[in-house]
Each structure stands twice: as C-alpha cells, then as structure tokens.
C-alpha cells in the first residue's frame, strides 16, 4: 500500500488528503480510506474503492502521487 493524494472538494481552495491506497499496477490505484471516510464531513473527488490513475506532482515541495482521473 502507498499514500496517494485525493483532492477535497468544496474547500474554497485546492486541498489534498493523503489516503493509504492499494497499487494495482503502475499509476493505477484503488483509493483506500473506507475505515475513516465520512461524506458528511469531507467531500473527496474520488471516494474509497474508486480505481484511479495517478500522476507525480509536487505538493509543498515534495513529490507525491495525486489521483487525477477515474479509470
């Protein structure tokens, strides 16, 4: 499992949440977080169990994997 970053929606600015997720193959992950995701408190661009394509991006000076689209 690896951390990927999922954009949070409705925050007024671009905000990402790190989510421990499951690598399927290069650049393809199943979003984790089923144990703590609460749609009443946070709106994620990609919810737990969604299969996503990730890209490397620099966030706060660190290279991370960011979910960019649903597969």
Image (tube, helix red, strand yellow):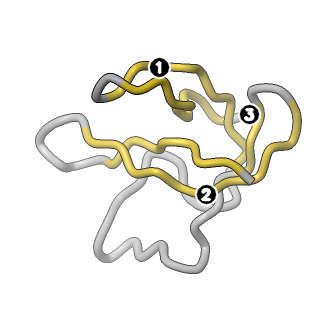
Q: Is residue 41 above or below residue 23?
A: below
Cα gap from disc 1 to disc 3, whole angstroms: 19 Å
In this view, 61 is above or below 8: above
Q: Position of residue 48 (x, y in %)?
A: 61, 61
- Between 48 and 20, the one lying in front of the other is 20
Residue at the spot x=56%, y=20% of the render?
A: 56
- Real-space Cα distance between discs 2 and 1? 17 Å
Q: Residue furthest front?
A: 61
Residue 20, numbered label:
2
- Looking at the rendered image, the quarter that the C terminus falls into is top right
In terms of secondary structure, where does tag 1 sit? strand
Tell which of 2 and 44 is nearer to you: 2
Q: Going by the image, does 12 lie left or right of 41?
A: left
For residue 71, which numbered disc appears in the image? 3
Task: State the mark number for residue 15.
Answer: none
Mark positioned earlier in the residue sequence (2 or 3): 2
Q: Secondary structure at mark 2?
A: strand
In the picture of the structure, the residue carrying the numbered disc 1 is 57
Q: Earlier in the sequence, mark 1 or mark 3?
A: 1
Tell me the residue at 74%/27% (across/down): 27
**Which image quarter: residue 59?**
top left
Q: Circle 1: is it few (<14), some (14-19), or many (20+) Cα within 10 Å?
A: some
Identify the element where label 3 is drawn.
loop
């Amino acid at each position: 499992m690896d951390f990927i970053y999922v954009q949070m929606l409705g925050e007024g600015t671009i905000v990402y949440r790190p989510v421990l997720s499951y690598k399927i193959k290069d650049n393809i992950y199943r979003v984790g977080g089923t144990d703590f995701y609460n749609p009443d408190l946070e709106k994620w661009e990609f919810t737990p169990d969604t299969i996503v394509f990730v890209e490397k991006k620099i966030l706060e000076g660190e290279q991370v994997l960011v979910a960019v689209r649903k597969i």
